[in-house]
C-alpha cells in the first residue's frame, strides 16, 4: 500500500468527514440532509456537534445511556460511500439511514414509515466493490430493532424492499426538462409495484452492501413523502421527527441486545436473547 492509497490527514483525520477515531460511537444514524442531523439529535438525551465539511455534518450524544452518533451523507451512492467508509475508519460499525422516500404500494400513505429489509441495486457505486449479483441486504438485527421501536412508539409502519437509484429524475421517473422520456420508463413504477417493492430512495443499496462486505450492520427507516401510485404527497417534517425517535430507540434496543450477546458469548441474535 502506498501513501496515496490511504487519504488520511495527520492524526488520522478523515479527508472528507474531518473526524478522527474516537469522535463517533459504534452506532451512527445517517440522514442525507445535514440539516437533519440536529433534528435527529432532538430525540436524544444529549447532543453535541463534532464536525461539518461539505455535505457531511457529524454529531454525537446519548440515548438511554447509550452513545449515539449521526452523520449526513448527502444525496446518492458516491457521497454515501465516503461517509460509511470514513465513519467505519473512526470506529462506527452500525449504520441506520434515516430519510424520506416515495412509496410504491397504494396502502402506504404519506407520513407512514417504511423499514427496509433490502434494496434493489439500481445504482452503480457499489459495483466498484463487488459483482451486481451480490445482494444488498439489511442487517436482520437492525430490522428487528427498528420494528420493535416502531411498535413501542405506536407508529404506523411497513416493512419491505427498497429500490435504490442513482438518478432522482430519470431513475424515479420524475418530470424532466423538455418533457424528456424514454419508452422503458413507462413501466418502471408499475413493474416495481407488482414486484412488491415498497419505495424509491437513493442510498440504501450502498449502505447495505458496504456494511455486509466490511462485516458491519446496516439498516434504514424512511418517512413517506409521496406515493407514486396514489399521487398523494405531504410535508415530511413531522414524519422525519418521528423517524428520528424510532431510530434512536432502535439504537438503545440494539445496544441492549449487543450486551446480552456479549454476556452469553454469542455472535448472533436469536429470539431467546432478545426476549
Image: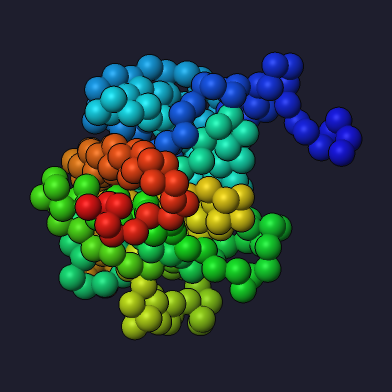
Could you tell me residue 275's position as x and y percent?
22, 52
Which quadrant of the figure contains the N terminus? Answer: top right
On screen, residue 170 above or below 254: below
- Disc tally is 0
Residue drawn at x 50%, y 73% as measured from the top left? 181
Residue 161 versus residue 28: which sits nearer the camera? 28
Horizontal side, residue 156 vs residue 67: left or right: left
Look at 55% across and 56% down and name the residue there: 212
Work out whether residue 183 can be spotted. Answer: yes
Horizontal placement of 110 versus 39: left or right?
left
Tell me which residue sits at (38%, 17%) in the image: 48
In this picture, residue 251 sits left or right of residue 14:
left
Image quadrant in which you'd find residue 147? bottom left
Rendered location of residue 66, percent (x, y)? 33, 28
Q: Nearer the viewer, residue 155 or 240?
A: 155
Q: Which quadrant of the structure image shows residue 173?
A: bottom left
240 to 224, vertically: above or below: above
Residue 190 against residue 260 in the figure, above or below: below
Q: Position of residue 96 (x, y in %)?
A: 40, 45
Amino acid at each position: 500500500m502506498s501513501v496515496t492509497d490511504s487519504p488520511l490527514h495527520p492524526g488520522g483525520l478523515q479527508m472528507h468527514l474531518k473526524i478522527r477515531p474516537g469522535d463517533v460511537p459504534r452506532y451512527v444514524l445517517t440522514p442525507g440532509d445535514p440539516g437533519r442531523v440536529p433534528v435527529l439529535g432532538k430525540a436524544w438525551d444529549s447532543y453535541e456537534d463534532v464536525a461539518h465539511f461539505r455535505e457531511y455534518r457529524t454529531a454525537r450524544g446519548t440515548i438511554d445511556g447509550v452513545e449515539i452518533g449521526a452523520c449526513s451523507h448527502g444525496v446518492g451512492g458516491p457521497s454515501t460511500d465516503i461517509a460509511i467508509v470514513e465513519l467505519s475508519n473512526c470506529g462506527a460499525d452500525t449504520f441506520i439511514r434515516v430519510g424520506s422516500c416515495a412509496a410504491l404500494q397504494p396502502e402506504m400513505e404519506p407520513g407512514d414509515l417504511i423499514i427496509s429489509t433490502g434494496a434493489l441495486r439500481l445504482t452503480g457505486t457499489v459495483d466498484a466493490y463487488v459483482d451486481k449479483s451480490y445482494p444488498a441486504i439489511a442487517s436482520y438485527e437492525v430490522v428487528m430493532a427498528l420494528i420493535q421501536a416502531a411498535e413501542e412508539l405506536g407508529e404506523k409502519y411497513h416493512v419491505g424492499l427498497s429500490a435504490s437509484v442513482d438518478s432522482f429524475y430519470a431513475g424515479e421517473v420524475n418530470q424532466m426538462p423538455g418533457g424528456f422520456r424514454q419508452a422503458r420508463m413507462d413501466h418502471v413504477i408499475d413493474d416495481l409495484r407488482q414486484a412488491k417493492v415498497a419505495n424509491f430512495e437513493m442510498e440504501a443499496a450502498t449502505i447495505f452492501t458496504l456494511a455486509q462486505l466490511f462485516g458491519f450492520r446496516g439498516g434504514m427507516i424512511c418517512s413517506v413523502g409521496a406515493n407514486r401510485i396514489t399521487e398523494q404527497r405531504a410535508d415530511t417534517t413531522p414524519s422525519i421527527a418521528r423517524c428520528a425517535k424510532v431510530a434512536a430507540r432502535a439504537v438503545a434496543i440494539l445496544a441492549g441486545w449487543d450486551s446480552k450477546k456479549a454476556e452469553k458469548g454469542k455472535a448472533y441474535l436469536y429470539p431467546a436473547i432478545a426476549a
